[in-house]
Image (cartoon, rainbow, N blue to C red):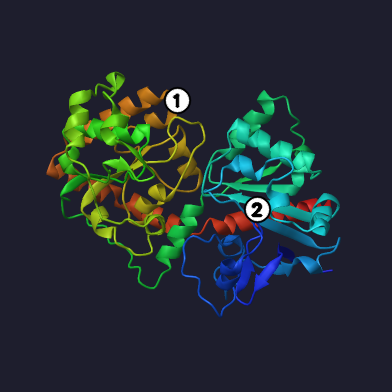
Amino acid sequence: MSDNIKIVYSWIGPIGPVWNTEFPNLLSLSVVSGYANATTTRVDSDDIYLKIFKGGWEKTRKEGFRLGAVMDMSKEDMFVYPFSLSWRIPLERYFQQGEGLLEFSHTPHHIINLVRNGRGFFLTDQSLEAFVDYSQLHRIHSYFQTSGIPLNKVIHLTGCMNANEVYRGFLRDNNLSTDPKDMINILSYPTHQTNMVRAINNSKWVEPIYNTETVPSKLFLTWNRRFRSHRIDLVLGLEKLNLVERSYISMGVVDPEQAHHNFAQVAGGGSPELGTDGSHVVRFFNRLPLEVDHEKDLLSMCSELKGTTGNFYKDSLISIVTETNYNQNEVTATEKTFKPMMHKHPLIMVGSPKTLQALKDMGYKTFGQWWSEQYDNIHDPTERMKEIYRIIEEIGTWSNEKILQFKKEVQPTVEHNYEIVKKDIAETIASQIDALVRKHSES
């Protein structure tokens, strides 16, 4: 009996596996064939094996794992059968009774039986998103229970950085068992950090040099592709504080994915609680579109593989990171968070409460030495935004001498964060999966 944990797929080509989530088609088979080239970006392919269990096609990421085929699995084998969950499909569809993930993917019956009664695990990966609110957790629980899958044989990867705290709250508030055998295994995996590691390891990447001798032309850099209420509040605050022209800001006239409303329609009359009104909306709307690097491709925006944004980090002082979640309890850390780390850039976080704490838990240093980071502990979204306004207004008064002093003082912190972002968190996830599977197999 092998001591390896097998990462099992139903379809494996010469250069790797096809994802288990859907029945393969000609395009997905061509991706792994080694003999054809599917140039479309509209085909989802599996990258769990590459990201977590292997560092590229030739390099083994972690000892103890190997690729496995469904036909070879027996009751003695420790294995993980992975599913990549696409952000394009609502989570509820994957966990719909009778026609959900297992049914739609045609998961082999003997694999289901080996997960139920053997040493196998299902791994669901939705680490691009932070979908772990109570209704979504209820869906996952209900689906696997109805399918006869022990909950502790499910490993769920999520981009939510405080997922276990949210999950414990879900169990408590619904009077559900906290016995480990009655719980799914939730692992927080900010997969975008792995993408940044990939960019840093690219042969074209040049490590940034943090310049402490020059005052940048802009104070702030903030990327805002999709309209979200906190992003609109942030840019209106910059308008109110007369800091727009001292910032690099990306913001379109319309949301690229919901073009039926323009910025002015969504912003309305501003936010009286934050001191913004219709005049700020009109002034900012008349500036649009605001483009920084003119990048239109979503994959390029998220991956940083082109390396085209570096000059904007060099020519600005601080990133204002408008993360995906703000009004929600689920903490997110996407490429918006990790790009400043890889470009040696200080940041202010416009995100859910405890986002900075999640970064500290990963080993990063934040910037409470130079401005108050109490906003990270404020749960009321309006009060949190008011405190962020106060901080950026204060920084807006800094003299050139103060800016240069700050850059000299902050350099060790941004250098530290660069060293942390270079270490792929997928290594940690692989170790956690290894420990979970082996512990269950020994019990």
**Residue located beneath label 2 in the image:** 432
Check disc 1 and report its element: helix, strand or loop. loop
Residue 171: image location, x then y, percent: 68, 30
Which quadrant would residue 80 be assigned to in this image?
A: bottom right
- Residue at (40% x, 47% y) in the render: 337
- Residue at (52% x, 45% y) in the render: 129
Is disc 1 surrounded by few (<14), some (14 to 19) or many (20+) residues within 10 Å? some
Q: Are marks 2 and 1 in contact (CB under 8 Å)?
A: no
As displayed, is residue 276 above or below residue 194?
above
Is residue 129 visible to us here?
Answer: yes
Q: Earlier in the sequence, mark 2 or mark 1?
A: 1
Q: Amino acid at mark 2?
A: Gln
Check disc 2 and report its element: helix, strand or loop. helix
CA gap between label 2 and label 1 equals 31 Å
Q: Amino acid at mark 1?
A: His
Residue projecting furthest to the bottom: 35
Going by the image, does 24 lie left or right of 248?
A: right
Residue 387: image location, x then y, percent: 32, 27
Q: Nearer the viewer, residue 246 or 399?
A: 246
Residue 149: image location, x then y, percent: 79, 45
Q: Nearer the viewer, residue 396 or 370?
A: 396
**Residue located beneath label 1 in the image:** 379
Residue 89: image location, x then y, percent: 56, 47
Going by the image, does 344 lie left or right of 289?
A: right
Quadrant (top left/top right/bottom left/bottom right) for the N terminus = bottom right
